[in-house]
């Protein structure tokens, strides 16, 4: 009986080796074996963009979001700048009050910027001299716009995988090549 199991194991090992070799694996000496296939051609690679993988409620870099207060918020620019705190990336937002109520200054929260595969939070800069990091100035009446500049201690080139959050709005994507 033990001899029969030994033969079965050896048979299975031989079949496995043959299957491995036919799939482009190697022989028992570690040499790679490649067998051309006349009946199968490789299919083209499948590519997906970040936009294809968009989750409901998450905006792309160029999208305009509508906040809980009815404000339409878009990112106008992402630019490398030299600030009083050294090199930084400055995001310029535009807020448009499309509603019928006044938007108070306290309704704009300081946006966060998280970047890279590890999701590193970028240090936010507040600078009077550079006019960045102060949020909205006063109320925004219905039909009016306000531009806000926010700065971060990170180089724009590092923003290939980025999430920007302001209040209930979330933008996600590659901001390293942002040009509007």
Image: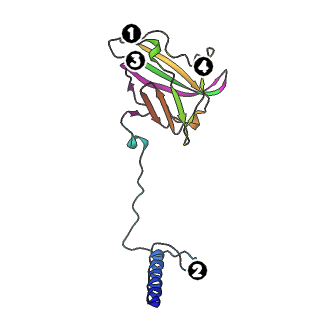
Mark 2–mark 1 CB contact (< 8 Å): no
Q: Position of residue 22 (x, y in %)?
A: 45, 76
Q: Would residue 56 be found to the left or right of residue 135 on screen? A: left
As for residue 163 lying within the magenta part, the answer is: no
Q: Earlier in the sequence, mark 3 or mark 4?
A: 3
Look at mark 2 in the image and give the residue it sits on.
29
- Secondary structure at badge 3 equals strand
- Secondary structure at badge 4 equals loop
Numbered badge on residue 126: 4
Look at mark 3 in the image and give the residue it sits on.
96
Mark 3–mark 4 CB contact (< 8 Å): no
Closest to the camera, between mark 3 and mark 2, is 2
Tell me the quadrant of the picture where the N terminus can be found.
bottom left
What is the distance, in whole Å, between disc 1 and disc 3 at their CAs? 9 Å
Q: Would residue 97 be found to the left or right of residue 164 on screen? A: left
Mark 1–mark 3 CB contact (< 8 Å): no
Height in image: 156 above or below 101? below
What is the distance, in whole Å, between disc 3 and disc 4 at their CAs? 23 Å
What is the distance, in whole Å, between disc 2 and disc 4 at their CAs? 65 Å
Q: Earlier in the sequence, mark 1 or mark 4?
A: 4
User: Around disc 4, counting alpha carbons within 10 Å, would you say few (fewer than 14), some (14 to 19), or many (20 or more)?
Assistant: some
| Majority SS type along the magenta span | strand
As for residue 75 lying within the magenta part, the answer is: yes
Q: Earlier in the sequence, mark 1 or mark 3?
A: 3
Look at mark 1 in the image and give the residue it sits on.
141
What residue do we see at 40% from left, 58% from top? 44
What is the distance, in whole Å, between disc 3 and disc 2 at their CAs? 70 Å
Q: Position of residue 89 (x, y in %)?
A: 58, 28
């Amino acid at each position: 009986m033990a001899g029969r199991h030994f033969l079965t194991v050896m048979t299975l090992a031989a079949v496995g080796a043959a299957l491995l070799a036919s799939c482009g694996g190697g022989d028992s000496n570690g040499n790679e074996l490649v067998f051309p296939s006349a009946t199968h051609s490789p299919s083209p690679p499948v590519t997906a963009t970040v936009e294809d993988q968009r989750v409901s409620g998450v905006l792309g870099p160029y999208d305009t979001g509508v906040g809980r207060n009815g404000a339409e918020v878009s990112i106008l620019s992402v630019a490398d700048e030299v600030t009083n705190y050294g090199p930084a990336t400055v995001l310029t937002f535009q807020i448009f009050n499309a509603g019928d109520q006044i938007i108070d200054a306290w309704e704009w929260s300081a946006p966060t910027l998280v970047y890279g595969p590890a999701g590193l939070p970028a240090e936010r800069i507040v600078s009077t001299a550079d006019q960045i990091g102060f949020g909205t100035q006063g109320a925004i009446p219905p039909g009016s716009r306000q531009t806000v500049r926010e700065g971060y201690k990170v180089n724009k080139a590092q923003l290939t995988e980025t999430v920007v959050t302001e209040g209930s709005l979330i933008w996600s994507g590659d901001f390293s090549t942002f040009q509007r």
